[in-house]
Image: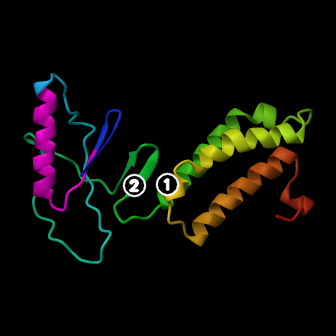
């Protein structure tokens, strides 16, 4: 299997030999068109989604250069982990929400800006940054709680409230 997006390529195979064949085919095809496959950015990940153990012999090579093995990598804004866990992706999305939040604090924390306008901005800019790619997550209760905590902190701050004000979550 092969997934393409802009200049990112994901090659998937059951064996390292299969990945090596596909990688060599891509390298030859690209180089015949005067393109190059980056040897410094290329990495591979062995996924362990099933309980069965496969032998981990051989290496993945790009030409004569050994490709480094990683436990997670970023693809299209998501962090994919070798064990199928999404903890790093959830943390990354929360950080993306806070980054968007910080870029807009001048408006969001201004007491002269109406709450309705702040709410609209939050729903159109900050929340989508936090939830990007989450529609395909198999999320756990603990991870959902982390997302809710971050969102409530942002909303309280936006409204000029703190936990000491004892306003209950709805």
Measured from the top left, where is residue 162 in percent x and y? 85, 55
Disc 2 secondary structure class: strand
Magenta span contains residue 106: no
Can you say whether 34 is above or below 14 in the image? above
User: Horizontally, is 89 left or right of 83 in the view?
Assistant: right
User: Horizontally, is 52 left or right of 122 in the view?
Assistant: left
Q: Main SS of the magenta segment?
A: helix
Can you say whether 159 is above or below 142 in the image? above
| Residue 82 visible to the viewer | yes
What separation in Å lies between label 2 and label 1 (alpha carbons)?
Answer: 7 Å
Which image quarter: residue 51? bottom left
Q: Residue furthest bottom?
A: 51
Decide which of 99, 34 is in the foreground and name it. Answer: 34
Task: Say which residue appears at 15% left-offset and 44% top-offset.
Answer: 23
Measured from the top left, where is residue 148 in percent x and y? 69, 60
User: Horizontally, is 2 left or right of 23 in the view?
Assistant: right
Label 1 packing within 10 angstroms: few (<14), some (14-19), many (20+): many
Magenta span contains residue 21: yes
Which image quarter: residue 107? top right
Residue at mark 1: 89
- Specify start and end residues of the magenta stretch as a single range: 10-31
**Mark 1 and mark 2 in contact (Cβ < 8 Å)?**
yes
Residue at mark 2: 80
**Quarter that holds the C terminus:** bottom right
Label 2 packing within 10 angstroms: few (<14), some (14-19), many (20+): many
């Amino acid at each position: 299997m092969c997934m393409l997006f802009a200049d990112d390529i994901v090659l998937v195979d059951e064996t390292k030999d299969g990945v090596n064949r596909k990688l060599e085919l891509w390298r030859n095809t690209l180089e015949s068109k005067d393109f190059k496959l980056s040897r410094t950015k290329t990495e591979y990940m062995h996924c362990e989604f099933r309980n069965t153990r496969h032998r981990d012999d051989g290496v993945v090579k790009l030409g004569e250069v050994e490709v480094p093995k990683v436990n997670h990598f970023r693809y299209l804004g998501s962090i994919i982990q070798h064990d199928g866990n999404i903890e790093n992706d959830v943390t990354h999305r929360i950080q993306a929400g806070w980054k968007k939040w910080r870029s807009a604090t001048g408006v969001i924390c201004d007491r002269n800006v109406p709450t309705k306008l702040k709410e609209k901005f939050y729903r159109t800019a900050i929340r989508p940054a936090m939830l990007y790619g989450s529609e395909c997550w198999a999320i756990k209760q603990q991870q959902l709680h982390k997302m809710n905590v971050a969102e409530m902190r942002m909303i309280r701050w936006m409204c000029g409230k703190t936990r000491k004000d004892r306003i209950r979550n709805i």
